[in-house]
Amino acid sequence: AQAEARKQGRLVGIGMASYVEICGFGPWESSSIRVDPSGAVSIFTGISPHGQGQETTFAQMIADELGADFDRIIVHHGDTGNTPQGNGTMGSRGLAVGGAAVMVSAVKIRDKMLAIAGHSLEVDKDDIEYDRATGTYRVKGTPDRALTFNEIAGAAYGGELPAGIEAGLVTTDFFSTRGETYPFGTH
């Protein structure tokens, strides 16, 4: 094909491009998560998506981590009136830094849900596990003693809570990076 192209006066070559780019830089990013009594979840982030699929990714992270219904998760971004302070979406930091902030918030919500589930099921918090396969918070070794995400969300606002646990499932958190990464490649 190359010889034929040359006969026709066309030049055929090989192109290569190399890159090194800073990624996931800080200094930090923020996230707030609110679970309402019905189990609907709102994620508030300082990251604004620009077509990278971050809304879907953040919602999927919360669905997987907490057992929330993916279709009942809304990601809010870009409105400084209701989102935490953010540093922006640039340099491939949206998921690396913004997603990490969402996970910090998710872990705090999950820990509170474990405490509420333990109290409701009359066992210690450490005896409760989140079972991703069934989406329930259950007593370890006793799968029939379990609560759903929505049941715990309702209890967080209207049930008897363990000592030291405030009503509601709301948190605002910040994730700080420890450094950057430098992805590179050649195409």
Image (spheres, rainbow, N blue to C red):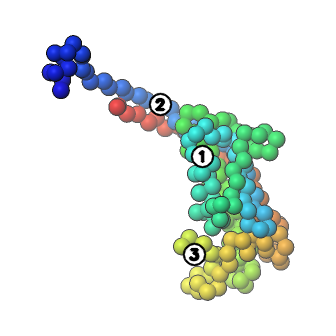
Q: Are marks 1 and 2 in contact (CB under 8 Å)?
A: no
Which residue is more in the foreground, 139 or 3? 3
* Residue 90 position within the rendered picture, expressed as x and y whole percent measured from the top left: 59, 33
**Numbered disc in front, either 1 or 2:** 1
Count of residue discs: 3
Q: Identify residue for label 2.
A: 21
Mark nearer the N terminus (3 vs 2): 2
Task: Residue 170: tell me if it is visible.
Answer: yes
Give the x, y percent position of residue 142: 59, 86
* Residue at horizontal 67 percent and vertical 75 percent from the top: 148
- Of pointers 1 and 2, the one earlier in the residue sequence: 2
Identified at 49% across, 38% down, the residue is 181
Residue type of the residue flagged with mark 1: Gln
Question: As displayed, is residue 70 above or below residue 133?
Answer: above
> Of residues 179 and 17, which is closer to you in this image?
17
Can residue 107 be seen here? The reply is no
Give the residue type that dot 3 points to.
Thr
* Horizontal relation, residue 5 to residue 34: left or right: left
Lower position in the chain sequence, tag 1 or tag 3: 1
Figure check: 156 above or below 122: above
The residue under label 1 is 54
Q: Amino acid at mark 2?
A: Glu
Q: Position of residue 94 (x, y in %)?
A: 59, 41
| Crowd around label 2: few <14 · some 14–19 · many ≥20 (10 Å) | few
Q: Residues within 10 Å of mark 3 (few under 14, many from 20)?
A: few
* Residue 38 to residue 44: above or below: below
Image disc number at residue 134:
3
Q: CA distance from mark 1 to mark 2?
A: 20 Å
